[in-house]
Amino acid sequence: MSDLPIVVVPVGVDDDALDACLAALDACTPPGARVWLADDAQSGPRGYAIVERWLRSTRLRADYSRRQRGIGEVAHLDEILKACGDSDVAVLAADAVPAPGWLSRLQASFAADGAIATATPWCNAGEAAAWPRIGEIEPMPDAGDAERLARALAQMPAAHPELPAAVGHAVLLRGGARRRAGGLDAESYGSWYAALTDLSLRLSGLGWRNVLCDTAFVARAGEGRPHDGDMDALAARWPDWHSRLAHFLMQDPLRDLRQRLADRLSEVGPPDMQRDLFL
């Protein structure tokens, strides 16, 4: 599966969330996909044990790195992305739970349009990419509901609508576009939430697209959060950002798409015994 993007999981401090993330990643990602667990000195003994156990059993081509001292999530992630060069990278939050088909469908969005620089899947806590209601945080679906949703999404024609910016639960970054935009700004932002928004806006200014991968879903317990000072830094660099996001949330241009997905979901039958066919 060398043609698939590299999956980067920035390891966090929530051991239970990491365990659930890795279990879903293994179950819902094609065997042999490359995964990099990147630890900015965050995991404790239990987290490290979870990672070690998973590395021994996973079907994926996985590696783990850990810094002796933390340098901050944005600086660390920028370091990891630079090490990936021009490769496309899917950054998956360590407290996210991907549904079947997530990575292959993100990859398909890049193949469909070379102008797409970031592709973000639906999420129950995805702000502009939230399902089933925009801007709202819904409970994480259980495994059965996520599997049904994945099958419904597999039947939807991909439209790749525009988003104001990528969202941090899961995002596929086009390597060449990211490098031309200058990567992440670790000097100005402390959170992945703000740094990803800033990168998205720079990419858009260079003519690239930030889109919703409307055939994929990744669950998360809550939305990402900015660090102190991040929103002020965003407002200083991008004075119209907050109004643009508010306008998108109020107008909800994805309303019809959500309704079509809801209609398709209501028609989904029993589980597909050949689920691996749409990983």
Image (cartoon, rainbow, N blue to C red):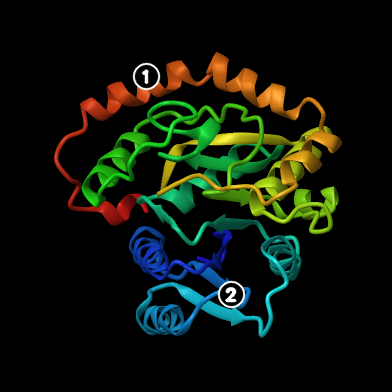
Q: Which mark is residue 259?
A: 1
Tag 1 and tag 2, C-beta contact below 8 Å: no
At horizontal 51% and vertical 77% (from top left) the residue drawn is 43
Label 2 environment density (alpha carbons within 10 Å; few <14, some 14–19, many ≥20): many
Q: Which mark is residue 199?
A: none
Q: Which residue is mark 2?
A: 39
Closest to the observer: 249 or 163? 249
In the rendering, at what x and y percent does residue 162 appear?
Answer: 62, 28
Amino acid on which disc 2 is placed: Asp
Q: Residue furthest front?
A: 228
Quadrant containing the C terminus in the rendered view: bottom left
At horizontal 49% and vertical 80% (from top left) the residue drawn is 44
Compared across the picture, whether 47 is left or right of 185 comes to: left
Residue 122 seen in this snapshot = yes
Closest to the observer: 204 or 136? 136
At horizontal 81% and vertical 40% (from top left) the residue drawn is 202
Amino acid on which disc 1 is placed: Gln
Q: Please tell me whether residue 239 is drawn above or below residue 180 in the rendered image.
A: above
The mark that comes first in sequence, 1 or 2, is 2
Q: Please tell me whether residue 126 is drawn above or below residue 244 in the rendered image.
A: below
